[in-house]
Structures are given as structure tokens and as C-alpha cells.
Image: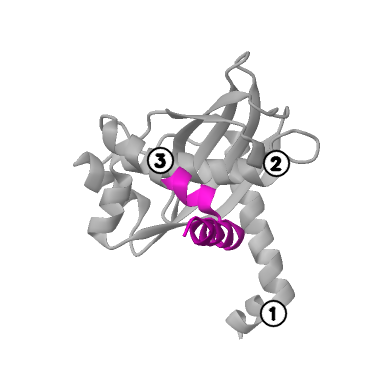
Amino acid sequence: MLLLVLGGLLVLFCTVDVWYFLRAVYVLIQTLLLPRIRDVLAEQQLDGVVLPHDVDYKGHMNNSRYLRECDFARFHHYMRTGLFLALCRMGAKMVIGASTIRYRRSLAFAETFEIRTRILGWDDKAFYLEQRFVSKKDGFVSAVLLCRQNVVHSSPEEIVEFVCKTKIKCPPLGEDVKHWINFISANSQALRAESGLEQKKNE
């Protein structure tokens, strides 16, 4: 019986990213135990540590793990602010439209850090967020990620108003974020032209 159980666990761990789902459950429980955050623009923190399955052959946190940790941090943010519940009640959803990460210093094995997530602003179609990996060792910002979360079946303004029960003015976006948004737009136009979509649209 023991061998059967161990064999089942081996198959499970070989075919499914078990640690991902365990981490997701942990973050969910954590958000349910913490008090609600009323300010959707407030920065929130999620603690983390570089574990053995996070590191690459150099002993540093694997590049892809940063993006996965950001997923958990955004979910943590949406749960605590009520944005996730608002999406469910409004029949809307958010999908990631773009993300750009800048690595400044590696996070080493067993190093503790926190991800600081905040909404920078929004437009008619998407929220724009910044997420920072801050080392607890010395407070150094090890990586910075900009993220565009596209809203489907609603708009950011409607979602924020639903959560806050009043209209909230979108804060001004920084010049770096504006340049990033312009890059996304220019890249989309270039890809459309490359595939002939713009020509078909004008015909």
C-alpha cells in the first residue's frame, strides 16, 4: 500500500506542478486571514523565500520564477482589495496583456524577499501595475516588473467604482510607464501590419 501511495505521488509530481497549486492554496488562505484593504491604490507586500526548486544551475532564482511569484502577488493584491470578488460579481475577468521585467541583482538560494505590488493607473481597457522584488537583507530592489492587466467584459473604471462605491480619479502615469505603453501600441501595430491585418481593416 505504501509503495502504491509513493508511486502515485511520484506520478503526480512528475506530471503536475504540485508546488504551484500548494503555493496558490497558501496565498489564498493567507488573504482570507488578513484584513481587507480599502484603498485599491495602496501598495501591498507578499513575503517570499528562494527555495531549492526556484534556483537555476548558478544557484540563483530562475528567471521564470520571478514571473510566477508576481502572479501570486497580484492574486494576493486583488483578493485583499476586493477586486477579485468584484470581477466575479460583475461577470468580468482580467488577463495579462503584457509584462516587462528588469533584473537588477540576483536573488540567491534561501534569500528572503518581499514583492511590493501597486496599481499605477488604468485606461479604458486595462490596469497598469508595478511589482518590485525587494531583498530583506538590505532593502535593495532586485527586480522590477511592469504589468498590463486587460479587463474583459467590463472596464477598470467600472470595477474600481464597484469596489470603492464611488468614482476614483486615475492617478497620473509616470513617463517611463507612458513610454512602455507606447512601445506596446507600436509593437501591436507593427505585428498587425506584418500579418496584413491593417491592410484588411482599411479595405
Q: Residue at x 51, y 36 (%)?
A: 173
Q: Earlier in the sequence, mark 2 or mark 1?
A: 2
Whether residue 72 is visible to the viewer of this picture, yes or no, is yes
* Magenta highlight on residue 181: no
Along the line of sight, the residue nearer the viewer: 197 or 58: 58
Whether residue 179 is visible to the viewer of this picture, yes or no, is no
Q: Which residue is mark 3?
A: 26
Q: Residues within 10 Å of mark 1 (few under 14, many from 20)?
A: few
Q: Does residue 136 lie above or below 27 as drawn? A: above
Specify the amino acid type for callout 2. Answer: Asn
- x and y percentages locating residue 8 in the rendered image: 52, 61
Q: Earlier in the sequence, mark 2 or mark 3?
A: 3
- Decide if residue 91 is on the left or right side of residue 165: right
Which marked residue is nearer to the observer: mark 2 or mark 1?
2
- x and y percentages locating residue 27 in the rendered image: 40, 40
Q: Which residues are magenta?
A: 1-24
Q: Which residue is mark 1?
A: 196
* Magenta highlight on residue 13: yes
Q: Earlier in the sequence, mark 1 or mark 3?
A: 3
Q: Does residue 87 lie above or below 176 as drawn? A: below
Q: Residue furthest front?
A: 1
Specify the amino acid type for callout 1. Answer: Gly
Q: Residue furthest top?
A: 138
- Calculate the distance from the C-alpha at mark 1 to the C-alpha at mark 3: 46 Å
